[in-house]
Amino acid sequence: LLNIGKVYARRQDFLLAENYQKQAYAIAEKLDTKRDMAAALVNLASTYYATGETDKALQAYEKARVISEKIDVPEELKKTYTGLAKIYSKLKNYEKAFEYQSKLNDVKDTLYNIEYQQKMSGQLFAYEIEKKQNQITILNKDKELQEIDLQKQKFAKNAFMAGLILIFIIA
């Protein structure tokens, strides 16, 4: 329902968008899924903002902010703070707009750090795999060399034994 509401909002069919977003919120609230509740409220606030219903948008964003801060989900906080900064700027409450813009910057930094850590973990994992693969390759090469060495030793031993047998036969 969240995505359906978004689609209708993009098509500027705000009544249907609002309807689906309210339904999404009601279901999320009934299931007590805080993240979905916050997402539905952010989408609803965005729809209200697009229709010029600033007061309703502010209320929805504030509700989403409380939930998002409680569950500490950076992606939802980013959307919420963006919306609140826009609304307070539109209302010419620049102090609040600046406050939420600052919080937004902090959340963006957090998201960047999370993304950076994930990339670094991925690269470290890939490096460790490559390192292990190289060790396996080296061990396989060593094993092949040992087998060749063993075959040479066997051949030399057999040649020596054959030579001794020939000497005993001739003598």
Image (cartoon, helix red, strand yellow):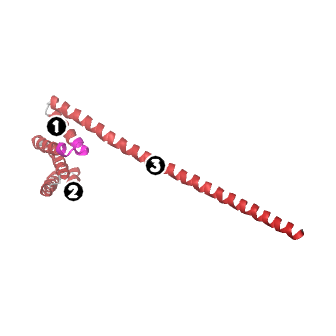
Is the residue 26 above or below the residue 54 in the image?
Answer: below
Q: For mark 1, what is the residue?
A: 87
Is 73 magenta? The answer is yes
Region of the chain picked out in magenta, as a range: 68-79
Which of the two discs, 3 and 1, labels the residue nearer the N terminus? 1
Which of pointers 3 and 1 indicates the residue nearer the eye? 3
Which of pointers 3 and 2 indicates the residue nearer the eye? 3
| Dot 3 crowding, Cα within 10 Å, few <14, some 14–19, many 20+ | few
| Separation of marks 2 and 1 at Cα, in angstroms | 24 Å
Tell me what residue is drawn at x 82 percent, y 68 percent. 165
Q: For mark 2, what is the residue?
A: 4
Residue 94: x and y in percent read 16, 29
Tell me what residue is drawn at x 20 percent, y 30 percent. 98
Which amino acid is tagged 1? Ile
Q: For mark 3, what is the residue?
A: 126
Q: Is residue 127 left or right of residue 3?
A: right
